[in-house]
Amino acid sequence: MKLHLLPLGITVEGSGADTVLSILAREGLEVASACGGRGTCGKCRFHILEGNAAPPTDAERRLLSGEELGRGIRLACQARPAGDLKVYLPATSLVRGQRLLIEGTWESPPLDPPVKMRRFEPWTPSPGSRVRSDLALLLPGEEGAGKKALKTDLEGLRELSASLRSGRREVGVVLRRGELLGTARPDAGALGAAVDLGTTKAALFVHDLATGKAVSSHGFANPQARYGEDIVTRMQCALEDKGKGRQLADLVRREIDRALSGMLSGTGYSCRDILEVVVVGNTAMHHLFLELPVEGLARSPYLPVTHLPLEVKARDLGLSLHPAAVVYLPPPVAGYVGSDHLAALCATRLAEREGPCLLLDIGTNTEVSLQVGGRVTCCSCASGPAFEGMGLSQGMRAGEGAVERVEVGSGGELEVRVIGDAPPAGICGSGILSALSALLKTGALEAGGRLRPEHPGVGDKDGEPAFWLVPPGEGGGSGLAVTQSDVREIQKAKGAVRTGVEVLLAEAGVSYSEVKEVLLAGAFGSYLDPLDALSIAMLPPFPLERIHQVGNAAGAGARSMLLCEDFRRGAEELAGSLEYLELSTYPSLALLFAASMYLTEEGVSRAKARLKA
Amino acid sequence: MKLHLLPLGITVEGSGADTVLSILAREGLEVASACGGRGTCGKCRFHILEGNAAPPTDAERRLLSGEELGRGIRLACQARPAGDLKVYLPATSLVRGQRLLIEGTWESPPLDPPVKMRRFEPWTPSPGSRVRSDLALLLPGEEGAGKKALKTDLEGLRELSASLRSGRREVGVVLRRGELLGTARPDAGALGAAVDLGTTKAALFVHDLATGKAVSSHGFANPQARYGEDIVTRMQCALEDKGKGRQLADLVRREIDRALSGMLSGTGYSCRDILEVVVVGNTAMHHLFLELPVEGLARSPYLPVTHLPLEVKARDLGLSLHPAAVVYLPPPVAGYVGSDHLAALCATRLAEREGPCLLLDIGTNTEVSLQVGGRVTCCSCASGPAFEGMGLSQGMRAGEGAVERVEVGSGGELEVRVIGDAPPAGICGSGILSALSALLKTGALEAGGRLRPEHPGVGDKDGEPAFWLVPPGEGGGSGLAVTQSDVREIQKAKGAVRTGVEVLLAEAGVSYSEVKEVLLAGAFGSYLDPLDALSIAMLPPFPLERIHQVGNAAGAGARSMLLCEDFRRGAEELAGSLEYLELSTYPSLALLFAASMYLTEEGVSRAKARLKA
């Protein structure tokens, strides 16, 4: 039986003998629960959207109301599927949700990587033989005779003869699109790496190019952060001082080297087995990684140096891989729409889906793409770092001690969930969205974003209105509050995203209800609860079942580009046909942005109506 | 009127009002003369093979016999053409013969270099424009839209934006076969360089790729010589110590940089304007230049690492040219037949000539190619360094003070000509050939190579028989002798060349008289007097008019490859179809070599006849 999980958009399999909890656990998806699955805490609620489960157990009848059971609410530790199920289970219901951020929901494309290894038995030439070179010994036929055009990499050639004369019975020769890169161990496969290079974090995936199988995956914090958390500061660094531009590039290159080396330790492989790397990232990361000048990116009209794909020798970037390894960088789409978004578009096959449909890659910068009739238009929204917990009075990244979820209990009281069961140390992006959603429900927060001073939970923090999620002194801490400024920051961030969606829909003449699918990608897009995003009107009122979270689609796209020539070519073609819409030149942008900051759908639509009038 | 000069194979133009001497002088070909063209010394003799000159002057009637005039012998300072003339004038008759070694007799191919510069007027993008990148500003149309595959060089990209933002009215964009190399000064043209990298000497040529015009040419002594005069010693160096391999490569790369920089000083160009370099050379030079391992070259079956053409970024070789400049190396043919010979084959269009025909590139190693029915077979003969004056008791390179010609005077006495009118300091390759030819005529030397002790000119030097060309004490010097060992060295050298020719002809079943043309290339091949080569049976008895000296054909081929894609493709195709014959595996090689050492045609043919019997 299949369980299709929304908004994650992934499908897992299980039998009717297992509970949903155990089926998910087997896939590494651990559902939050306080009683260890004994059916006593009621925390593991989930929502059946389609299909049937076995009848409710006694525990479920005890902990859920008849109305809840009627709507399809069940307990994961009790319910067993009675057939295929479509289930709503936000990542925030999962303990190990973080895992998704790296793994994504990747479907391997047909295996056809540019890099291919051929195994040869070298033979010793006799003086009378007509073999023309060491290379010809390894390449019989047309290529060996020099009659077919074959390029050779100089570094690869340098090591060729030694491999040949090593006395090995078999030599692996690595070719990449008509270029001989050199030799490789015939017993190992040639490896490839995909890197999703983000401003804050990078995700790396290593695959065996012969089988397509994943060898290892890993994430690291972008070490360029020491020159500035945001890309603007880092670009400023590079602009002021060419040496610093070099340092920024070196930092991230060395970290990639280190990460790959660590990922392969104990696998029987080494970095020398890596023959191709696909790097996707936002355009600033792309430029800083390559040490391309960022003058054009730093001011309007925010032009990248190039809009074309690039192939660079890894050695030219100082990466310590196979001496002839190639780094492939898909084309940047625009100054603020990077190859990571292109990769996400391709991984989700947005252009081929039934349209109209949307893809949002939510982060410090949010890229939004709309596909209508096969044509994709994209834009970039400066959503700022609030979703990553930055710029909030007590914000933090989603990690140990971060409030990740706030719910309104049955008695109207707020229940706060902390990552790692640690005492609350701050609040992360999904937590603040969830908190605002809860505050709106309890009436502590107005649609316009004002914390109501008269509401019992609203107090004061450092002279401004604040809602104390955890009062000071509770548990010995200094407490945790959502301040009026925090609300404003989130309003700006979610308003920017909403504005991007509004402009794309308006330009294409597409109404909310016509949108067939809304895909949320990226770390934050995969971790937020879409219900919260709808509750605070960050997204237009799309039906919940149309919203899918697709994990690290950029990483998935990079992996597919690594393994499949066709996929890569498709990405390059899409980049050439993609329409980019520059929001800053859109008329009445400021007014639309102001309307988009309302925290209720009613608020937004009223303000928009005034705008039209 | 046209003067076709043999064996140089070049044609010069002049009028009937000019003497042959002045016509040649205008082309930089200064004929040796002692009286300054006053018709008194008789040194400027030349031979009219076809056509008519104005009747002999009084001076000619005085200095030349009726028989000589009847055979077409004339004085260059007196004779004036009466129509087109075919003239025999060996390079040894020229004072500035050396000039030919560099310039060769090059005919420019149809101009179609891989590197092309396009001029663009950059325009400043407005925020509303749909330009996608700095690059797109320079590339309108399909390439700009990213719809046509265009590769870009990372280093070229790095400087692109700065050029664009420099405020210049025009920007030169340099493309090479679908790859954007970067920008160049639109007022200058893109330059290219051709390098013929020899073991002893290198010849460099710089051309404007937009017009094909030669900008500068230059030669330098290969600085690797400090690690050994011959390639075997240098390869041994590289084999023993990888660091030395690096030094050998660096030495020659730095010298190329220096030479190009010097060549361009004062021309308005700089090395940064050079976008492509074609390097040809023997296979050892090819490998040492590229720092490829020479293990395979050092022992039988003498395999190069690759038999394919290579394209390398100049920066990867440490050359200081345009940041994205490309170095192209045509394919080596075999371990001892290099891309220089391939270039010479192409420059002389040997494969398309009426066959059977031969091309000999005479040097320390002599490559011989025979074309029959469009099919070219080549071999390599270890002729050794004697032709370059090395290994002789008083040998020296062809330079100031070197005896370059020995003639038998009308009284049977020997006349010695020295380069630069300096006192004789030694003897060069063409000089020793000429000396042996003269000694054979005077009877001092036997066909088997023995100096006759009973001949009055034969004395003793350091305990062995020697012929004193300049007796000790004459002119205050210690004299100049051809020793018995010198004769043996030349016998071995010329025997090796003759053996190569014999084997190729025998394998193809071609008789001497069937050979339509014999082309002599390379420094020594261009400078020796073919009459001398015939006199000592270095070449089979080919009719003199079938022997053409083609100068530095390798350099000419490299220049043509630089300027013409088709020519380059032709070279690569020829390399693929060329047959290589390994002499060392040829049956009865030693006996054939022994026969080839005889210094008279009669001697050689008798020994060959014994061999067959």
Image (tube, coloured by chain):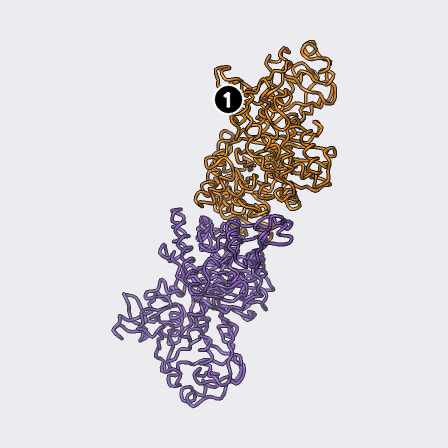
Chain colours: A orange, B purple
Determine whether, in the image, residue B139 is placed left or right of residue A271.
Answer: right
Q: Is residue A216 visible?
A: no
- Counting from the top left corner in percent of width and height, residue B2 is at 53, 79
Q: Is residue B284 above or below residue B60?
A: above
Q: Is residue A30 above or below residue B605?
A: above
Identified by mark 1, the residue type is Ala
- Counting from the top left corner in percent of width and height, residue B553 is at 50, 65
Chain of the residue under the numbered disc 1 shown in the image: A
Residue sitting farthest toward the bottom: B58
Q: Is residue B330 above or below residue B452?
A: above
Instruction: Kindly identify which residue carries mark 1.
Output: A425
Query: Is residue A468 or residue A241 the one in the foreground?
Result: A468
Q: Is residue A354 above or below residue B82?
A: above
**Quick one: quadrant of the C terminus of chain A?**
top right
Q: Secondary structure at mark 1?
A: loop
- Counting from the top left corner in percent of width and height, residue B16 is at 51, 85
Q: Is residue A132 visible?
A: yes
- Counting from the top left corner in percent of width and height, residue A500 is at 64, 37
Query: Is residue A93 or residue B190 the one in the foreground?
Result: A93
Residue at left 70%, top 13%? A65
Graded by Cα atoms within 10 Å as few (under 14), some (14 to 19) or many (20 or more), the crowding at tag 1 reads many
